[in-house]
Image: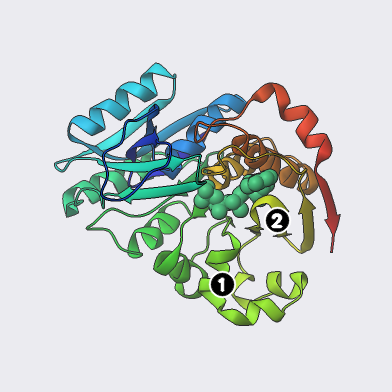
Amino acid sequence: MIITITPNPAIDIAYFIEDFKIDNIHKVSKIFKTAGGKGLNVSKVLKILGSDILATGFLGGNSGNYIRNELERIGIKNKFIDTDGETRTTYSINDNLNGTTTEIREAGPNISKSENEEFFEYLSSMDDEGNIFACSGSLPNGLDSGFYDRMLDILENNKVIIDTSGANLRHIVFDAKKKPYAIKPNIDEIRDLFGEKIDSMSKRELLEQEAFKNIPIVIISLGKDGCVAKIHNKYYECKVPKIEAINPVGSGDSSIAGLAYSISNDLSEVATLKYSMACGVLNALEEEIGHINIDNLESTLEKIVVNEI
Ligand code: ATP
């Protein structure tokens, strides 16, 4: 089973507004309201891929109930820990006329010590060698990078994928004693970690960083340019087909879904990269975040080129 962990889920509200201007009143031409947060985007794509999944994390208040109902409706098994606070809402204002996206993000509820303990008790009960875990997105208030240390400790016999950024990614890459099985930073997150020096490095040098030594899979995603990746001791570059992207938000989450799917199906290294990239490409072709058209999977896989570097 693949267990997705979303520490800080959100109701994602996407407004489509033509010619959005600050200090003005606007009519919304289209609205999407979805159960979101990076881990839930991963869950939705895994569900479309047909994986056996369970979603966990923290949910609270009316927004939490909305997300639970949505997950039931789309048939995603879930077991979230209840929090006293209210699950957050995030808003994006998409202006197709000017090609801008403005995002407003709430921080999320405060997780108490006892809620955190309850989560780790639950996680311990899921520690089974066959299970794969994918933990994505920001941490709510009350949790710090020690959350990942404890998670990696409890799940040391499992394959754990972590997709995070900023100080938490820094902690995992440079400081954590136990390492995840896979990470998928994008190039901006890599620049945050290593600074401008990465601009003068070759792709291979970038992947050969000492800090990645104990992380078996490192995929550095490059948006429309695909990715470069290290899988065990091999190094790869992947090119994806040129597309007219509709909404690339969530493509990183979709590529995590492709990665988790490939690990759970024991696919080859090349196939793993192809699935991961194809899910990202297919998400970019949809308006809805965390959605892929499965009918186009095979043809997209065929167009992805993977070379060893
Ligand atoms: P997010 O945080 O929005 O989920 P990300 O920054 O983590 O995304 P990206 O590098 O943007 O991740 O995208 C992940 C993968 O999705 C890419 O490696 C690529 O395969 C695919 N992808 C993303 N954007 C495009 C695009 N415009 N055209 C083709 N493929 C894309």
Residue at 23% x, 32% y is: 63
- The local crowd at label 1, few if under 14, some if 14 to 19, many if 20 or more residues have their Cα within 10 Å, is some
Which quarter of the figure has residue 295? top right
Q: Which residue is mark 1?
A: 191
x, y percent for residue 283: 60, 36
Residue at 74% x, 76% y is: 205
Left/right placement of residue 34 relative to residue 130 reads: left
Q: Is mark 2 within 8 Å of ligand 1?
A: yes
For the residue labelled by badge 2, is the local secondary structure a helix, a strand or a loop? strand
Coloured how? rainbow
Residue 158 at least partly seen: no
Q: Amino acid at mark 2?
A: Cys
x, y percent for residue 78: 37, 29
Q: Amino acid at mark 1?
A: Arg
x, y percent for residue 185: 56, 59
Return the residue nearer the eye: 124 or 309: 309
x, y percent for residue 265: 68, 35
Return the residue nearer the eye: 128 or 49: 49
Q: Which residue is mark 2?
A: 227
For the residue labelled by badge 1, is the local secondary structure a helix, a strand or a loop? helix
- The local crowd at label 2, few if under 14, some if 14 to 19, many if 20 or more residues have their Cα within 10 Å, is many
Above-or-below relation of 75 to 308: above
Residue at 31% x, 29% y is: 67
For the image, the number of numbered tags is 2
